[in-house]
Amino acid sequence: MPWRSSLALFIVIFGVIVAAFFVEPIPASSLAIARPGLGVRAAALLDTLQRLEEGSWRAWAVRDGDTFAHLLSEDHVDVGPGGPSDKARVVAGVRSPACVVADYAIGGFRLARFSDDAALLTYHASQKTACGGVAVPSPTWVSSLYVRRGGRWQNALFQQTQALR
């Protein structure tokens, strides 16, 4: 009865494909973590990392590479459509006039804490940005991994994945 396993596999794959095209994504605004349920330490960390992330977007919009030079860890990796980039390349890119940020919005922040010194911030972002005259994909889901080193939080990994909407 090998045809039964093939049929079952086909049904599962078909279901995943249908879901990908027809299931409504969860709105970013509904993903915001309710602070009362977080606990004091987690809520404080979420606030701290969210402020750092918001500051990085403000810096990106005005080409403030110094903010990125301070925020990013020495071993930082930024994963984008062109592949991974290191800290030096990111800072140079932020300082470059090649990208023009007309507008952006971020929200729906969520926190996943892996240890006392490692936490992942995820959220939804949209932006009207062009680099070299080409529109940057938007909206996106963002993963931003922070590590605490030397008593301060630094961004070790940043990745954007284009959202369905």
Image (cartoon, grey):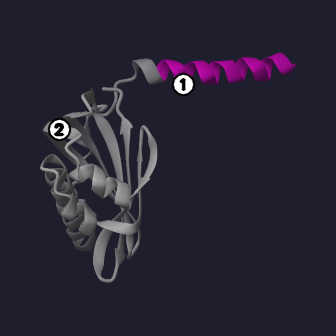
Residue at the spot 16% in from the left edge and 41% down from the top edge: 105
**Image x and y of residue 161, in percent:** 39, 39
Quarter of the image for residue 128 reads top left
Residue numbers of the magenta segment: 1-19
The mark nearer the N terminus, 2 or 1, is: 1
In the rendered view, would you say 137 is above or below 146?
above
Of circles 2 and 1, which is in front? 2
Give the residue drawn at x 29%, y 49%: 93
Q: In the rendered view, would you say 104 is above or below 3?
A: below
Closer to the camera in the image, 44 or 7: 44
The residue under the point 21% across, 54% down is 34
Mark 1: give few (<14), some (14-19) or many (20+) Cα within 10 Å. few
Tell whether 53 sits left or right of 22.
Answer: left
Residue 100: mark in rendering: 2
Judged from the image, the secondary structure of the residue bearing numbered disc 2 is strand
Q: Amino acid at mark 1?
A: Val
What is the three-letter code of the residue carrying label 2? Val
Q: Which numbered tag is attached to residue 61? A: none
Foreground: 56 or 1?
56
* In magenta segment, residue 6: yes
- Determine whether label 2 and label 1 are within 8 Å by CB: no
Q: Main secondary structure of the magenta part?
A: helix
Location of residue 74 with respect to 106 vertically, above or below:
below
Q: Does the image show residue 64?
A: yes
The spot of residue 3 in percent (x, y) is 82, 16
Vertical position of residue 151 compared to residue 38: above or below:
below
Residue 110 falls within the magenta-colored stretch: no
Residue drawn where x is 41% and y is 18% of the image: 22
Quadrant of the image for the C terminus?
top left
Query: Disc 1 marks which residue?
Result: 16
Which residue occupies the extreme right position in the image? 1
Q: Position of residue 84 (x, y in %)?
A: 46, 49
